[in-house]
Amino acid sequence: MRRFGPDRLIDQLRPHITDERVLEAMHTVPRERFVPAELAKEAWDNVPLPIGAGQTISQPLIVARMLEVLQLRGGERILDVGTGSGYHAALLGHLGSHVWSVERHRALSEQAQRNLREAGVRNVTLVIGDGARGLPECAPFDAINVAAAAGDDIPEELQKQLGFGGRLVVPVQTGDQRLWLVHRTPRGLERKGLERVRFVPLVT
Ligand code: SAH
């Protein structure tokens, strides 16, 4: 189905994102359901937007990049840290099997629950708490997505909850802030620094 907002956004993402599944997910999940009603007309712009409690829904290009590096193929059990609006969790749910998404702000989590329901997303479980600790009772995960910046290093607890072949993407604030990708391979944990980004801090 052709829809002007999503079509234009996908045109903007295509030069940077090669995974067609990610582009299809970004076209399908209705971002307008995850932003405050008064910002709905900007929902398909490639920009972060305020969602209350001093937090933002991330820029679509960054979300798409984080989805791409996780290399989801369907069937994955996924942990998402920093639910915010629930948008990133909905995309992860579209690409994988089930998502557990942790948020420390109760009000944001409750709004995210409403957003997910209105968007018809059924495979995302929201949890209120400190996502830096992960969710050991549901581990191991095939993929872990962190949408707030860890200080100095990749959180140890999250790496521990990564299953065999699993991937973790997380912004880390050292001198600058950049995305890191951790892959659990038969040789052990392989870490790779990616592009510079700007996320709010992971509050612990
Ligand atoms: N993924 C969100 C945007 C994330 S903004 C979306 O798609 O809309 C980062 C979120 O991380 C904020 O909502 C913030 O409250 C949350 N956060 C920060 N530290 C956290 C922690 N330790 N545990 C869980 N959530 C945290």
Image (cartoon, rainbow, N blue to C red):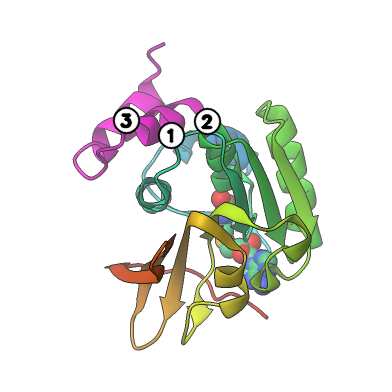
Q: Which residue is drawn at 56% across and 41% down?
A: 76
Please identify, in this view, whether the residue under mark 1 or under mark 3 is nearer the observer. 3
Q: Which residue is at a point 32% across and 30% down the rendered structure image?
A: 20
Magenta segment's dominant SS is: helix
Magenta range: 1-30
Instruction: Please tell me which residue is depicted at 51% across the width and 35% down the height of the picture.
Output: 95
Q: Is mark 1 on a helix, strand or loop?
A: helix
* Up/down of 157 relative to 136, above or below: below
**Foreground: disc 3 or disc 2:** 3
User: Is the residue marked by circle 3 packed among few (<14), some (14-19), or many (20+) residues within 10 Å?
Assistant: few
Residue 140: quarter of image: bottom right
Does the residue tagged 3 have its C-beta within 8 Å of any atom of ligand 1?
Answer: no
**Residue at image mark 1:** 26
The residue carrying pointer 1 sits among few (fewer than 14), some (14 to 19) or many (20 or more) residues within 10 Å by Cα, namely many
Q: Residue 49 carries which label?
A: none
Tell me, yes or no, whether the two marked residues, 1 and 2, touch with CB atoms within 8 Å.
Answer: yes
